[in-house]
Structures are given as C-alpha cells and as structure tokens.
Image: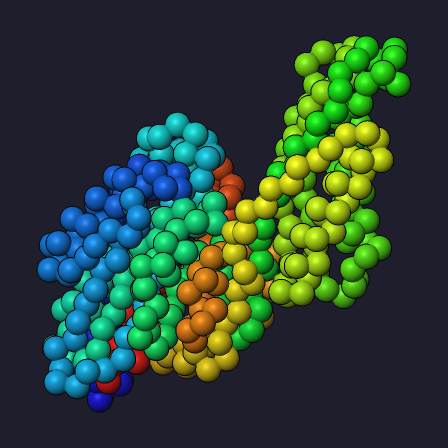
Amino acid sequence: MHDKKNYLKKVYTFAQEQFDYMVKLRRDFHAHPELGLQEYRTASVIEHELDDMHISHKRIGSTGILGIIHGTSAAKGKTILLRADIDALPLQEQNDILFRSQNDGIMHACGHDVHTASLLGAAKILSSMKKNFSGEIRLVFQPAEEIGRGAKEFLAAGVLEHVNRTFGLHSAPDLKVGIIGVKPGLNNASVDQFKINIKGKSSHVCAPHLGIDALYIASQIVVSLQGIVTRLSSPVEPIIIGVGKLNAGTAYNALAEHAALEGTTRTVSPQARSFVKEQVTKTAESISSLYGGTAQIEWNDFTPPLLNDAEVTHEVKELADELFGTGHTTDSREVSLSGDNFAEFNQTVPGAYAYIGTSNPQKEETQNPLHSVRFNVDEDCLLYGSSLYAAYALSQLA
C-alpha cells in the first residue's frame, strides 16, 4: 500500500458508500439483542454477511466468529487482528424508536451493535481492497464481553499466533461524533467478580445466642470491605470494592441461616489486583469466624487492566488525523474504572483500543451514558468506526 493519501481517501469513500448497509445492520442487531454466550442469531447474521463477502470464517466456541481476509500481493506480510464485541445487556429499553429491542429485558446499551456493524463495514472495505495488500487480517467477533467471557476462548484457539498488531474500538457518548479518543498506557481497570456465601445457624431473634446470624455477618462484611480501600491501600491509586447484591433470611423474626452477597473489584495494577483479592477473602473469612459462621468465597476473573501500547497508539492517532483531519483525536479521556476484556488481546501483542464519539448535541438521546435504558448513538459514528478499522489494518499491511 504505497500511496497512503490515496488509500485513505478510498477507505473513507468506501465507508460512505457502505453507510446505509451499516445502519441497516446496526438497527437489526439493536432490535434483536442477545445476552453473552446466547448470541446465536447475531452470530448467524455475521456469518451470512461474511459469506456474501466471500470471507472465510469459523466458529470459536458456540457464538464467537473468526473471519479471515488474506491479501493477494506476492509478499507474505503481517497479520493484524481487529476485534468487535457482540453481546447485549439485561436491561429493558426505554427508547421510543422504530428499531427498539424486540427482546424483553435485553438491550444493546453499550454500543456493541455499533461495533459489530462497523467491523462488518470494514470487512467489506478490506475485502474489496485485498488485491492491494499482503498479509492477513483476522476479524474477531467476540461474545460475552459484558460478563468477562469470550476473549479467552479465542486465545485458546490460537487467534494471536503470528499476530503483529491488535486493534479494537468502543462507543463513547462522552465524545462528540467524529472525535476519536486514543491514548497510551492505562485506559481501563481490571475487573473481578466475587461471590461470598455465608453459613450460620437459624434461631428465634429473641435468642440470638442460640444461633449464628448470617445476615449480620454479611452486613459487617459489606461495611468492612470499604476499610480495605480507605485504610489498607494507597489513596493515590484508584480502587473500587462494590457490593451489588445481598440476599438473606426467610422470616422477619428468625436469624438468617444463610446469606449470599456478590460484588466486584476494580484495580489498575497487577499488584493491587492481587492484594485486593487477598484482603476481600481474608475479611470475609475473619468476620464470619468471629461471629461463629463460615464463609466460602468464589472469584471470577473478568479482565486485566487495558493498557494501550505507546507505539500502536501513536500509529492510530496519526492515522486518524490523516483520515479525518487534524483535531479529530483526543488523548485527554479520563481513565475508566470500567473494564473491557479486549485487554486479553493486547496483553502479549502490541495493540490499542480507541473510543469513537457517538454523541450529538442536537440529538438528546445520544447524550445518555453507556448502560442506560435510553442509550442511543448518532449513527454517523459508523463512518468513523468502519473506516478507522479498515485504514489501520491497511496501514500495517504494505
């Protein structure tokens, strides 16, 4: 790909030509959202589109899709991985739109419909230009990002073998459409989930000494966990320990025999991640023991911290400035303590995650945050997402 200015112009022109196609796809995905590891319809639609483009593909797990585009130039070239997540959230959509979710209690409230449509748009562009590059492009349509799954299955299948660069993107309602947020280093926190099951002994509330109050123990654990943040860790390093669920008891006048709580931790370094897990476990066990109960702790590791490679970040920023014009990128987005397991892909292979602006001050619904029941996007973001996906791959495949 020798004439950079010419291919960038061609990529953006192709993206404009595919805009209606991407809007139709995005709205179809939005109307038919599916939860993590249940994205069967979504996967079938992706496969149908790749078949139409004559792009080879295979299933990874039950709902993941790996598409592969081979360049046809003589040289072997590099291998580039592009990733989009495809799952939705357990939310009841409140938007009054023609393509509102048809699946009760499930909604694309995090922009994964945008990511999937953008990567399919990029696939069309790249497929039409494969005579102009060498090497290989791997298209990863990953399920179950919202529940910290999907990525490891691709890694186990060897998707990173011989890969030189990884690239992904995510919707960003805090950025106006047309703005790309990309910066080196830490972008997102690590995310872990914990479940604590407490066993006590039931008795009448008027005779607490004859029982072991699992609800009281659970309450003490919830309060004490915050001491890990405020008294055992550095105040200059962000740490979150949050409990979102607590279930206990069967009667108003009986001590609860069992209690169960669930929560999450967010940290920004491997050391803090290990320390917090150890302290949460120790706190639960110690408090349970103090009041005569026992605690069983289960951990689910969702994702490590998302760190953008400095060199790849520079490549993406430089490319976006050339593709869309100077002033269309920003490196000032704050670090987010939300997580994204794209981090699994760029832990061992240089990569970057970019944030695509999706808001428009003239469209009120696009101002709503991620995971809102009224989340929506300015669909012009599809032009930026698809062309950046395609242009970055082409920029690496001379």
Q: Is residue 392 visible?
A: no
- State the quadrant of the N terminus: bottom left
Residue 130 image position (x, y, % from top left): 15, 74
Query: Going by the image, does 323 lie left or right of 216?
Result: left
Q: In which quadrant of the rendered view does residue 190 lie?
A: bottom right
Which is more toward the observer, 390 or 278?
278
Residue projecting furthest to the bottom: 2
Residue 81 image position (x, y, % from top left): 32, 68
Q: Residue at x 60, y 42 (%)?
A: 298
- State the quadrant of the C terminus: bottom left
Query: Going by the image, does 324 lie left or right of 44?
Result: right
Q: How is the image coloured?
A: rainbow
Q: Is residue 76 above or below residue 221?
A: below
Q: Is residue 27 above or below residue 180?
A: above
Which is more toward the observer, 261 or 360?
261
Which is more toward the observer, 152 or 368?
152
Q: Is residue 26 above or below residue 321?
A: above
Query: Going by the image, does 74 lie left or right of 179?
Result: left
Q: Residue at x 50, y 79 (%)?
A: 310
Q: Residue at x 52, y 56 (%)?
A: 303
Q: Residue at x 22, y 60 (%)?
A: 67
Residue 72 image position (x, y, % from top left): 12, 77
Residue 188 image position (x, y, % from top left): 56, 61
Q: Is residue 113 visible?
A: yes
Which is more toward the observer, 23 or 344?
344
Q: In which quadrant of the rendered view does residue 342 lie?
A: bottom left
